[in-house]
Image: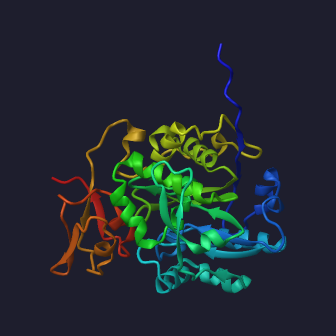
Amino acid sequence: MKDDPIKNTQMVSIQKNNYTDIDLESLLNPLGGIKKYINRGERVLLKTNLLSPSEPEKAVVTNPAVVHAVAQAILKVGGIPFIGDSPSGQFTRRRLEKAYTKSGLKDVANTLGIELNYDTRVKKITIPQGKKLKRTSVCAFVLDADKIIALPKIKTHSAMIMTLATKIMYGAIPGLTKAKYHSLFIKKSAFAGMLLDVLSIRPPDLFIMDGIIGMQGDGPAAGEPVDLGVLLASDHAIAMDLSICEMLGIEPIGVPTLRQAKIRGLWPTDITYPLLSPKDVQYPGFRLPSTVDYLITGRKTPRRSPMPTDRCTACGQCVRICPKTAIKIINQKAQVDYLKCIRCYCCAEICPDEAIDLEVLR
């Protein structure tokens, strides 16, 4: 008779919440409170989801109210919080400034007197535990932090299905390098494995998930906001993402990052819920991206392609980010060469006008 596997129990704290009165202390108490993770004088990176310059109401970025609450808690225990991420597109001070301003994070920093990261230095490092990615460029501000608190958002993702805690550290990879990796890791399984390698570079000390207003449909940029009304906290990314899948009625093995985590033996054997359980906050009818709605319906749908619409303003951001140079501006409108296109959907993610729909080619 085989021995039982080593028990690996993780904790996920789930709480009903809203942006006007965030009760962070009650959420974190079961985990040991913020003092368990932060020491006086430590520089603490608040790693937000700052995909692109976007208003908080669109649910593309971590809501500034959550960032404000976490920063206040860190200040209270003597930590030194600073806000940072590497949005899609070019990793420049100008783009960071635009993203911080539009997302409301600059207001948070000004109100609390804390720092926004404008350091665009990059360091080349090896990944000792990397299985798909052995060496990469990483944003220096991530490596220089004493502690990291990741603040992901419950969002769909047209390529990876969901973009939860296991994907939040992809923002440690600078700007256009992220687009290059879409080209190098075309298969979903390979891309998901690469994301887990990136997460292993510098795993956050704590994850606090913004699920108050999430995103459903064709995320991570063009989906629709959905009122989920929850905050989650854990120091284990996989446990947090499994909990969200149960909450939303998603088969977790169908999510590429969680499937690869299962293969790598990273799933916890048990998850405990000291406050609410996923069943207590279930949300029926959550819509996945149109590219993968078979995970809920059971019906395999044809592969969808990025289709520029008349909303296109010929800004050229899709041209610059495309890892296969499959897009050109012709007659003041983006045009896609579908023989080159790998359906990574980077163009749809970065489009500031949401002018690229995902459709089945006829």
Going 62% across and 51% down the picture, which residue do you hit?
A: 237
Q: Nearer the viewer, residue 130 or 217?
A: 130
**Image location of residue 223, percent across then percent down:** 42, 61
**Image location of residue 246, percent across then percent down:** 57, 41
Can residue 123 be seen? yes
User: Is 155 on the left-hand or right-hand side of 109?
Assistant: left
Q: Quadrant of the N terminus?
A: top right
* Colouring chosen for the image of the structure: rainbow
Can residue 287 be seen? no
**Image location of residue 339, percent across then percent down:** 17, 58
Going 38% across and 54% down the picture, which residue do you hit?
A: 159
User: Is 225 on the left-hand or right-hand side of 211?
Assistant: left
User: Is 357 on the left-hand or right-hand side of 98?
Assistant: left
Q: Is residue 233 above or below residue 98?
A: above
Q: Nearer the viewer, residue 147 or 66?
A: 147
Going 76% across and 46% down the picture, which residue do you hit?
A: 275
**Image location of residue 6, percent across then percent down:** 70, 31
Q: Nearer the viewer, residue 15 or 137?
A: 137
Q: Is residue 266 above or below residue 95?
A: above
